Amino acid sequence: MTLTIGDTAPEFDRRNVKIIGLSVDPLDNHTRWAHDIADTRGAAPNYPLIADTDFAVSKAYRMLPAETAGDPCARTAADNATLRNVFVIGPDKKIQLVLVYPMTTGRNFDELLRVIDSLQLTAAHRLAAQWQPGEEVIIAGSVTDEEARRIYPDGWRAPRPYLRIVAGPPPTPSPADPHDGSE
């Protein structure tokens, strides 16, 4: 599945995940940007954007150097390139992942959903893997064999002593597409 901007809300809602954008541009620039995206991509972003015009959030998360100051509108796209970061913050309020995208690479909701699914899989089932729904998974290294026997009484396959593989949980169905004619 490839998500477009207008499709993201149901997929993130289903995972109980909130999206928020951050930009050093003022709020009126966000409105123009959203209209441009709607005109060129068919839908505007459907998540809130923070106007970080004083660079406080950007500097707190070290996306911009501490000495950054001045009018954000006077800065170039190259000056603000480091704002092309994605943070995944867990329910424990700790940063679980940071992706820094170069200016030439668009951010991708599909890859973020895969990472979120993997993080949630690990939290819920103590599994780890380069994981896609329906694939086999690896029992996390932090789980002892004794714990694994309780959690996975049917056992596991171990091609290496440190690599314990079990069937992954069944994929969670996506919400029905409102345009597919089913109810």
Image (cartoon, grey):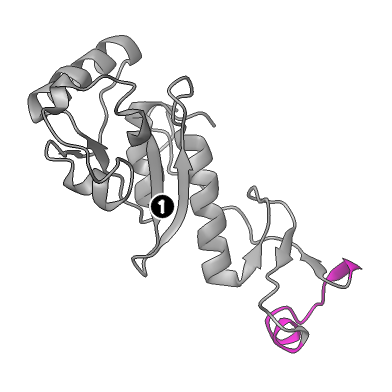
Kindly identify which residue carries mark 1.
88
At which x and y percent is residue 177?
42, 34
Percent position (x, y) of residue 94? 38, 65
Indicate left or right for 32 with 64 as reference.
left
Q: Secondary structure beneath disc 1?
A: strand
Question: Which amino acid lies under the numbered mark 1 shown in the image of this protein?
Answer: Val
Q: Residue at x 90, y 67 (%)?
A: 160
Q: 34 or 154, which lies in front?
A: 34
From which residue to which does the magenta span run?
Answer: 146-160
Q: Position of residue 144 (x, y in %)?
A: 72, 84
- Residue in view at x 68 percent, y 79 percent: 143
Find the residue positioned furthest to the front.
67
- The answer to which image quadrant residue 71 occupies is top left
Q: Magenta segment: does it hold 168?
A: no
Residue 152 visible, this orientation: yes
- State the residue at coordinates (25%, 34%): 46
Task: List x then y, in percent, for residue 11.
Answer: 41, 43
- Considering the image in quadrants, where does the N terminus appear? top right
Return the residue nearer the eye: 91 or 11: 91
* Residue drawn 19% across the image and 16% down it: 35
Residue that lies at the very extreme toward the right in this rendered image: 159
Q: Is residue 174 visible?
A: no
Q: Determine if the magenta segment contains residue 152.
A: yes
